[in-house]
């Protein structure tokens, strides 16, 4: 079958496909957490003292009493087997953005040849996956290749159902033989503990005698594209890289905004229902669903949860989205920029901190100007984002997210804070040294008596800001759709820890001198605004003026690519931040630099290879076939003396030649292996390989606009985005 036949067959198969009927939705109470080994289930089957000890670890982060593990393991096994599981898996999150799991059977062979099911406390608590193939950035050389997984009691175990059966999944951390974190969960747990300690100290200074352990919370909004799998299978680029390396934008894109929040297409609605049912069974509180701006793009967001659990749930959500899509004949693209010319996908990470005694510490209340506690926590965030803005840029730096950041659809690569008009005004008053009031937006009247009046939010939204205050939380909007949320959460928790400690030190010293609490607090906040207020920006983050002003007047860093951003991890002040908060040792931090740099280079080189092979073996043949058809027609017309035009043939010939020349240049460029450092290698990818790839694409996309449609082998944008 020739390529173009494959393309047309895909269209026919999609049009003729048998529809999956919509499900009758089950009652939420019947679905909720049926696949999770919840506290309630534990309480029902564990001895009282065991349950109590476990519950206290889960709820307060206290030390785990390992002696209870055997009893918990047996109960967990019985429950999992009752759900149909024959296998268990320690699930962990290596430094790639994937979820890793190693499956083991419950089977235990006895001396008489019979079998029993077995699951001991020891295997619940600790596993040893063959971890040598996971990236470790030099922490483990092969002579010390052991890696361990250890049970994270604070994130519940669950059963995951796939076509291959049911597996008991146990969330774990992944560490080296020398105790270094090789994963994304360990630093998240450490950063949460560090934040809790620093916040407790400050809350006590503010006069609270009872302070419950603090947790960071996270509500991640996940954007994604759905494309029929028939199309994906006939596009090597989507299949291997998750994005289109070629493709001419369709005549209709997102210019009419008619997809955004429009009626969800029926087939997609059936898919979403299926996803939500699976998520509910896994105890994941999916709450919001809608169409996104680009055609074929959608969003799902859960209700927010404790950061560690939210992060595990987010990984599970990505898995469920991918697996369920397959069942519905879709491919779920989580790549940040699957299609050129229309919006890419992000993952807004909503984040706050709080506890059961003081509540949400980022809730400003009705009069934020006099809410000292809120002002200090919010001021701590402002200071952190200013001081460590480049770190926030690093944790969203990937080869795929580079296509999105700063592309006038997603936040710029310059990190600033949006506070909204009310808070911006309050912090400005603080800076001026006299705090009088909080402005109020009043009520919104709609001018129609039958419509309700409602209170206006004290601040509007600003979609162009990478880090925005949205009422009672911050929303980090630069995170990529394909990323784990752990890195961003670790960064936010850690910079907050640093700022809270700095504030507590100052406050403690002032109080010791006998300064009144509010005088001391406002003085500290004034200092924060004087030294760090430059990071607050309420204007248009997409504009050229901001890019100029941010860098030239405010001294903020603009790090447009991952190659520019990653080396920040090696800066002394970043090492010190992680060392003093106890979140990452310098070797652990270095290992992250190594791994992420290698990933960046790996992705770009792989894509470059595919650009070369697709240009040569898919696009070039189509262009040449069309050219020979044109040449034949011209020759025939010439022979019988009819007028002919050679313009199209010339255009195709010229574009084809330009494309093949650029492909040769890219091939040569790719064979360069002589780099003084990994930093130089990254820069080479960003400054030499990527532009050449873009150039090849430009010529190929121009050809797509000339070559006869029936000869074009790759599914086109209009088909992939609009046929459902
Ligand atoms: P929008 O698209 O308007 O930004 P969504 O409703 O889609 O908002 O998503 C907002 C996310 O923020 C949800 O996951 C929500 O649960 C979460 N969220 C709400 N309050 C908090 C909070 N205090 N801390 C963390 N996340 C929160
Ligand atoms: Mg949002």
Image: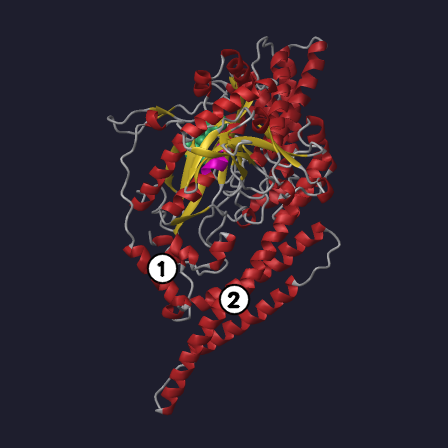
How busy is the neighbourhood of tag 2: few (under 14 within 10 Å), some, or many (20 plus)? many
Q: Label 1 vs label 2: CA separation?
A: 21 Å
**In which quadrant of the rendered view does residue 535 lie?**
top right
Residue drawn at 60 percent across, 69 percent down: 664
Q: How many marks?
A: 2
Is residue 316 a member of the stretch shown in magenta? yes
Residue drawn at the location 62% of the way across and 31% of the way down:
187
Instruction: Tell me residue 277's x, y (percent).
Output: 36, 34
Specify the segment rendered in magenta.
313-317
Residue sitting at the far left: 450
Residue 276, quarter of picture: top left
Q: Residues within 10 Å of mark 1 (few under 14, many from 20)?
A: many
Residue of label 1: 10
Q: Whereabouts is ligand 2, in terms of quadrant?
A: top left
CB of mark 2 near ligand 2 (< 8 Å) = no
Give SS at disc 1. Answer: helix
Residue 615 shows which numbered tag? 2
Could you tell me which quadrant the N terminus lies in?
Answer: bottom left
Q: Is residue 401 left or right of residue 273?
A: right
> Is label 1 or label 2 in front?
1
Q: Secondary structure at mark 2?
A: helix
């Amino acid at each position: 079958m020739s390529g173009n036949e494959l393309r047309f067959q895909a269209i026919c198969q999609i049009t003729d496909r048998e529809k999956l009927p919509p499900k009758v939705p089950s009652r939420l109470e019947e679905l909720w957490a049926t696949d999770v080994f919840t506290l309630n289930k534990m309480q029902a089957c564990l001895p009282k003292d065991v349950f109590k000890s476990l519950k206290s670890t889960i709820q307060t982060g206290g030390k785990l009493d390992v002696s209870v593990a055997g009893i918990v393991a047996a109960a967990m096994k019985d429950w999992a087997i009752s759900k149909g599981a024959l296998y268990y898996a320690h699930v962990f999150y290596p430094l790639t953005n994937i979820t890793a799991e190693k499956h083991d059977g419950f089977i235990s062979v006895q001396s008489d040849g019979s079998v029993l099911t077995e699951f001991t406390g020891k295997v619940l608590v600790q596993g040893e996956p063959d971890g040598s193939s996971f990236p470790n950035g030099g922490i483990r050389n092969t002579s010390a290749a052991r890696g361990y997984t250890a049970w994270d009691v604070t994130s519940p175990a669950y059963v995951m159902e796939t076509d291959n059966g049911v597996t008991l999944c146990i969330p774990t951390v992944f560490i080296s033989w020398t105790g270094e974190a090789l994963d994304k969960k360990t630093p998240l747990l450490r950063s949460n503990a560090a934040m809790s300690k620093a916040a407790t100290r400050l809350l006590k200074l503010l006069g609270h005698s009872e302070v419950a352990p603090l947790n960071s919370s996270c509500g991640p909004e996940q954007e994604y594209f759905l494309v029929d799998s028939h199309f994906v299978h006939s596009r090597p680029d989507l299949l291997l890289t998750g994005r289109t390396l070629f493709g001419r934008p369709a005549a209709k894109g997102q210019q009419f905004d008619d997809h955004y929040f429009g009626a969800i297409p029926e087939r997609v609605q059936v898919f979403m229902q299926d996803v939500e049912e699976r998520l509910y069974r896994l105890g994941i509180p999916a709450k919001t669903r809608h169409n996104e701006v680009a055609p074929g793009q959608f969003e799902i967001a859960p209700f927010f949860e404790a950061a560690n659990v939210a992060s595990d749930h987010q990984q599970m959500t990505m898995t469920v989205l991918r697996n369920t899509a397959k069942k519905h004949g879709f491919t779920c693209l989580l790549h940040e920029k699957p299609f050129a010319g229309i919006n890419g996908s992000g993952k807004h990470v909503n984040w706050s901190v709080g506890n059961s005694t003081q509540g949400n510490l980022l809730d400003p209340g009705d009069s934020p100007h006099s809410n000292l506690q809120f002002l200090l926590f919010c001021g701590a965030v402002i200071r952190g984002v200013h001081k460590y803005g480049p770190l926030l840029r690093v944790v969203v730096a990937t080869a795929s997210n580079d296509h999105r950041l700063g592309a006038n659809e997603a936040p710029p690569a310059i990190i600033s804070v949006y506070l909204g008009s009310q808070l911006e005004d309050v912090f400005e008053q603080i800076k001026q040294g006299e705090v009088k009031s909080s402005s109020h937006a009043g009520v919104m009247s709609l001018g129609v008596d039958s419509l309700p009046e409602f209170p206006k939010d004290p601040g509007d939204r600003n979609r162009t800001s990478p880090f925005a205050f949205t009422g009672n939380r911050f929303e980090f909007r630069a995170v990529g759709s394909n990323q784990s949320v752990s890195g961003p959460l670790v960064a936010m928790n850690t910079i907050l820890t640093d700022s809270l400690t700095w504030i507590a030190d100052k406050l403690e010293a002032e109080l010791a001198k006998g300064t009144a609490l509010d005088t001391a607090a406002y003085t500290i906040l004034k200092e924060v605004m004087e030294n760090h207020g430059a990071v607050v920006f309420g204007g248009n983050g997409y504009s050229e003026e901001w890019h100029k002003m941010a860098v030239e007047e405010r001294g903020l860093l603009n790090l447009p690519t991952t190659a520019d951003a990653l080396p920040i991890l090696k800066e002394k002040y970043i090492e010190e931040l992680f060392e003093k908060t106890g979140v990452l040792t310098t070797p652990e931090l270095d290992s992250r630099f190594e791994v992420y740099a290698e990933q960046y280079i790996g992705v770009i080189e792989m894509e470059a290879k595919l650009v070369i092979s697709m240009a040569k073996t898919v696009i070039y043949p189509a262009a040449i076939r069309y050219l020979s058809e044109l040449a034949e027609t011209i020759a025939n017309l010439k022979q019988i003396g009819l007028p002919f035009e050679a313009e199209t043939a010339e255009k195709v010939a010229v574009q084809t030649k330009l494309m093949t020349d650029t492909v040769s240049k890219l091939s040569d460029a790719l064979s360069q292996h002589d780099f003084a450092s990994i930093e130089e290698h990254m820069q080479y990818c960003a400054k030499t390989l990527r532009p050449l790839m873009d150039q090849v694409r430009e010529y190929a996309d121009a050809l797509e606009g000339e070559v006869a449609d029936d000869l074009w082998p790759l599914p086109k944008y209009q088909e992939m985005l609009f046929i459902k």
